[in-house]
Image (cartoon, coloured by chain):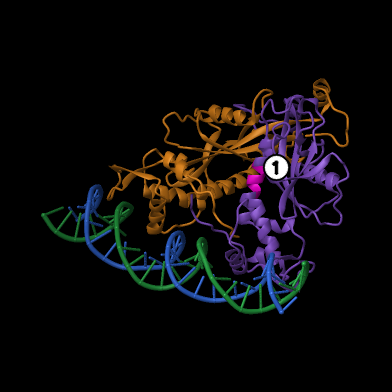
Chain colours: A orange, B purple, C green, D blue
Amino acid sequence: MKELSNNHVKSLKAVQSEVQSYNKVALSIDCVIFGFEENKLKVLLIRSDMKKFHSRWSLLGDLLNPNEDLDEAAYRILKQRTGLDDLFLEQVQAFGKVSRHPGGRVVTVAYYSLINVLNHKLRILDNEIHWHDVTAVKDLAFDHQNIYETCLKRLQKRVQEHPLGFSLLPNKFSLRELQNLYEAILGIKLDRRNFRKKFFSMDFLVDLEEIETDVPHRPGKLYQFDYEKYEKNKKKWSGIDF
Amino acid sequence: MKELSNNHVKSLKAVQSEVQSYNKVALSIDCVIFGFEENKLKVLLIRSDMKKFHSRWSLLGDLLNPNEDLDEAAYRILKQRTGLDDLFLEQVQAFGKVSRHPGGRVVTVAYYSLINVLNHKLRILDNEIHWHDVTAVKDLAFDHQNIYETCLKRLQKRVQEHPLGFSLLPNKFSLRELQNLYEAILGIKLDRRNFRKKFFSMDFLVDLEEIETDVPHRPGKLYQFDYEKYEKNKKKWSGIDF
DNA sequence: AAAAGAGTGTGTAATAATTACACAAAGTAA
DNA sequence: TTACTTTGTGTAATTATTACACACTCTTTT
């Protein structure tokens, strides 16, 4: 950031007092927290406590603290709301329409996060917070519908290019679970044989030589994702195509 | 954004005074403005006027005004600095490390923009502003090196999936110019015959039945990008691959 | 114990996309 | 007229994608 046409060199003091005098805005962080349960992609929402939005649902968010990085704030919110740390988290973008918040100017920075809902540490304490099926999310408070859809699109894109989906699954998973996950995220059906062929040919799944238990049919083999191998071998060039 | 565990319903007045009381931060917009000239990808930078950064280069930016959307502010900066409006502009993300600005807490939202440097309206008035070859950009002021690299990567990704590159070219261009552009953005050499085959098979280029002038060799045919046709036919599904 | 049900595991043929690669033609400059 | 530079074009080999069917394993039902 820099002022228009200003040719003298500014001392640190001058810059500090300049920043003091800047117009300032409230800055919040909103998190779109995805989970995967019963073969459905879910998102964690909280009921709005504002009259204007009479009990409509909204994203989980909070204000940025004065001495907190943006990412830190997002992790703090996740920790507060789920009890989990060390989650997958990615910033999507800032949303800053002047009138997006009825209480005044509030710019928000949106993140999405992926959590494994079977994690034994997961605790959703607040009874105003619920998991919602992504296909049923509508009419969110504020501009949260827009933020949510932007984040979901980002997830759909990313999951096809990067191995993030595994963050939504238990450590050991069957190929059927993996396929269900992709189908739920992308909202489409995939061919089972081609799906398997694709993942086997990428060669990042470790066959654990174990099988599922408690399924009412022939059990499938269990796999793990090999992050190390992925980091060594991942693609750089995808090709021009639109 | 929403408070933690608060069960009563808030009136508009209550929300307004709540927002009043929020911690606030200075918010700036920084633009990575790309241009294409002499077969090189360029970026527009301004000399920092801060002592701490003794004449290092920085991105073009400014503060967000109180009644301005983020996108509006970015357009305003572009207009101020280049004289152009109606440019390609995309937000990348927010950067908000606590200590990123020596003068105090300033969160910035980064955009990148593509401009056609031959546009007759382009005016770079401030003599502290210069075009820099992207391969030579280093040691920028603030955290601008990081912002710049993030934006360049975003451009590299996007240009392979969306037809943005044309914003950097004149309205009529030869395939050689288009290929030079892609090579400059991606920083790699491409096979000429395969490049042509790819673009022809996508079938969004209109043959203008004109040829280049003023080239010291056999002139190439001129083309235009057909945005309408693209909008009708663009791909939705790219496929899982990483 | 046998049969029905449900999902796993596997391969191939057809099509489409990508890659590597060479030569004649059209213009300019000397 | 010759040398130089860049355009325009096609094919063969490889790789990736798609569509698609049947035998096997385990559970549940009768």
The main secondary structure of the magenta stretch is helix
**Residue A229 place in picture, x, y as percent:** 42, 42
Q: Chain of mark 1?
A: B
Task: Name the residue beneath numbered marker 1.
Answer: B136
Q: Is residue B204 magenta?
A: no
Q: Is residue B154 magenta?
A: yes
Q: Secondary structure at mark 1?
A: helix
Seen in the picture, residue A213 relative to B102 is either above or below; the reply is: below
Seen in the picture, residue B63 relative to A136 is either above or below; the reply is: above
Q: Quadrant of residue A52?
A: top right
Amino acid carrying label 1: it is: Ala
Q: Quadrant of residue B163?
A: bottom right
Query: Foreground: B59 or B70?
Result: B59
**Residue A50 place in picture, x, y as percent:** 68, 34
Does A217 sit left or right of B241 as displayed? left
Does A197 sit left or right of A26 as displayed? left
Q: Residue at x 63, y 45 (%)?
A: B153
- Whether residue A216 is visible here, answered yes or no, is yes
Residues rendered magenta in the picture:
B150-155
Q: Quadrant of residue B81?
A: top right
**Residue A170 place in picture, x, y as percent:** 40, 38
Query: Foreground: A206 or A5?
Result: A5
**Residue D4 place in picture, x, y as percent:** 69, 66
Does A206 sit left or right of B219 as displayed? left
